[in-house]
Image (cartoon, grey):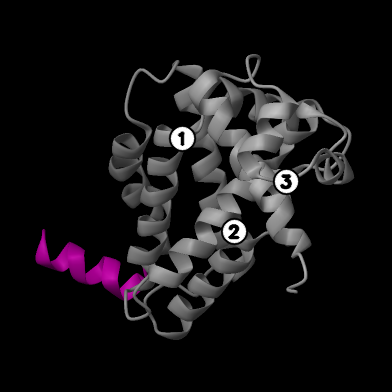
């Protein structure tokens, strides 16, 4: 008999919870429904979580699960800048299609006031590891500027993504998060381009 994978069990609970939160709302979702949808047990649920409220901090887990899937499908030959824009576009598509804006806003607000772990800033996450890898490879290939450290560029990219999510929540989701990011992010990330690329573009477009 195959051994149960604790990560898979916890992951199923997290995925089921956020699916239900999106479909029927946080307040209308019960622990029993999460257990049933995730096909786990009450014992398993309470092994990982004290209750439903504890799941609010797991949105970063859901994001990382998405990044792991995207990493499998992303073309390794894609330029580093295109990889960063692709990751953002796909993440924001997922947010618009499967994450309640109210819960995203709640997560962002709790991260501001919590005295505990700030999950969105945990640099051990898949998110940060993947960004470091892409940016380091981009610098080595001459696709990204080496005027900043990898850590600084990762911080700036993550800062821009959080700002876009915060602004979307602040505006009540009155526009498409993904479409707006596709307009803003390339301009923001232009500072990541090597100096010679910027110079060439200026010469071509006087």
Drawn side of residue 174 relative to residue 206, left or right: right
Residue 80 position in % (x across, y down): 39, 71
Drawn side of residue 65 relative to residue 33, left or right: left
Residue 41 position in % (x across, y down): 78, 43
- Above or below residue 29? Residue 138 is below
Residue drawn where x is 32% and y is 35% of the image: 180
User: Few, some or many C-alpha atoms within 10 Å of disc 2 (few <14, some 14-19, many ≥20)?
Assistant: many
- Above or below residue 47? Residue 77 is below
Residue 9 position in % (x across, y down): 72, 54
Residue at the spot of label 1: 98
User: Few, some or many C-alpha atoms within 10 Å of disc 1 (few <14, some 14-19, many ≥20)?
Assistant: some
Q: CA distance from mark 3 to mark 1?
A: 21 Å
Q: Can you tell which of label 1 and label 2 is closer to the viewer? A: 1
Residue extent of the magenta highlight:
193-206
Q: Please give the label number shown on residue 40.
A: 3
In magenta stretch: residue 201: yes
What type of secondary structure mainly makes up the magenta span?
helix
Drawn side of residue 95 relative to residue 43, left or right: left
Quadrant for residue 14, please give it: top right
Q: In this orientation, does residue 149 appear?
A: no
Q: Can you tell which of label 3 and label 1 is closer to the viewer? A: 3
For numbered disc 2, what is the local secondary structure? helix
Q: In the rendered structure, are the residues bearing label 3 and label 1 in contact, judged by CB atoms less than 8 Å apart? A: no
Residue at the spot of label 2: 127
């Amino acid at each position: 008999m195959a051994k149960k994978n604790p990560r898979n069990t916890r992951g199923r609970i997290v995925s089921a919870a956020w699916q239900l939160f999106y479909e029927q709302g946080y307040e209308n979702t019960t622990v029993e429904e999460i257990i049933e949808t995730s096909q786990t047990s009450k014992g398993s649920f309470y092994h990982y979580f004290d209750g439903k409220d504890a799941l609010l901090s797991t949105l970063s887990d859901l994001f990382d699960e998405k990044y792991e899937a995207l990493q499998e499908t992303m073309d390794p030959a894609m330029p580093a800048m295109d990889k960063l824009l692709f990751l953002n576009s796909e993440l924001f598509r997922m947010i618009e299609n499967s994450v309640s804006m109210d819960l995203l806003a709640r997560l962002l607000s709790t991260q501001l006031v919590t005295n505990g772990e700030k999950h969105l800033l945990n640099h051990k996450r898949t998110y940060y590891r993947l960004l470091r890898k892409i940016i380091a490879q981009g610098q080595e290939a001459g696709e990204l500027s080496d005027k900043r450290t990898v850590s600084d560029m990762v911080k700036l990219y993550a800062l821009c993504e959080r700002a876009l999510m915060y602004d979307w929540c602040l505006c009540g989701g009155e526009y498409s998060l993904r479409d707006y990011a596709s307009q803003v992010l390339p301009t923001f990330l232009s500072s990541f381009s090597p100096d010679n690329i910027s110079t060439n573009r200026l010469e071509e477009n006087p």
